[in-house]
Image (tube, rainbow, N blue to C red):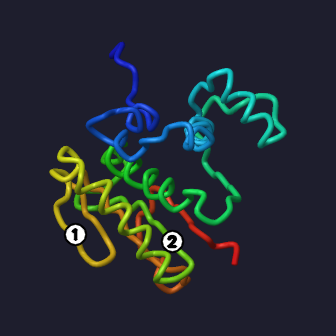
Amino acid sequence: MSNRRRFNIIDAVNDDNLFAPWFKDRATWAAWFTFLRALFGLPLLDRELTLYRECTGRQTPPTAPATEGWLVGGRRAGKSFVLALCAVYLAAFHRYRQYLAPGERGTVMVIAADRKQARVIFRYIRALLMRVPMLARMVERESAEAFDLNNSTSIEIMTASYRSLRGYTVISALLDELAF
């Protein structure tokens, strides 16, 4: 067993070669970093623990990644960007092959309420993938609504419709603006 610690989403956000350039004013993203730490079951710093308790009413933060997370945020809070970040991180930095049959692709499904919102998220995902050389090399195919990565994983953008969601091997489903 390796002594090397696992590369987590906060490592990716802090890495200058990955996502750090998108977080120029880090203080404005502090609440999101706390949310990501809690969502992925990462240890919280003292100031993050205080914020976590204030926002959730819970005393003890999670110690394992969440299987489900819900959040409410106002307009322009960064929800769609963080959702895109999570989609790219889950697709690019996790290994799913051991769960997939030969030739099968795991899908990180991003579901938006309508085409306009889906387009916004798709653009964020495209930027996160294509503007990072290491991630751009992983892209085997890009279509109008999907990216196929060379690790048997796809990120697909869809609108909320029970007809279009069937038949996928979903490894993660990220839902945006679906309360309406």
Q: Secondary structure at mark 2?
A: strand
Q: Nearer the viewer, residue 51 or 86?
A: 51
Disc 2 marks a residue whose amino acid type is: Ile
Q: Quadrant of residue 180?
A: bottom right
| Disc 1 from disc 2: Cα separation | 18 Å
Q: Badge 1 local density, few (<14 within 10 Å), some, or many (20+)?
A: some
**Residue visible at 68% across and 25% down in the picture:** 47
Q: As drawn, which residue projects farthest toward the front?
A: 25
**Residue visible at 47% across and 58% down in the picture:** 81
Q: As drawn, which residue projects farthest toward the right?
A: 57
Q: Nearer the viewer, residue 54 or 96?
A: 54
Q: Secondary structure at mark 1?
A: strand
Answer with mark 1 or mark 2, whichever residue precedes in sequence.
Answer: 2
Q: Nearer the viewer, residue 154 or 97?
A: 154
Disc 1 marks a residue whose amino acid type is: Glu
Task: Give the image location of residue 79, x and y in percent.
Answer: 56, 58
| 145 shown above or below 24 | below
**Residue visible at 35% across and 47% down in the picture:** 96
The numbered mark at residue 142 is 1
**Residue visible at 23% across and 53% down in the picture:** 131
Q: Quadrant of the N terminus?
A: top left
Residue placed under numbered mark 2 in the picture: 111
| 7 shown above or below 19 | above
Task: Give the image location of residue 56, x and y in percent.
Answer: 78, 42
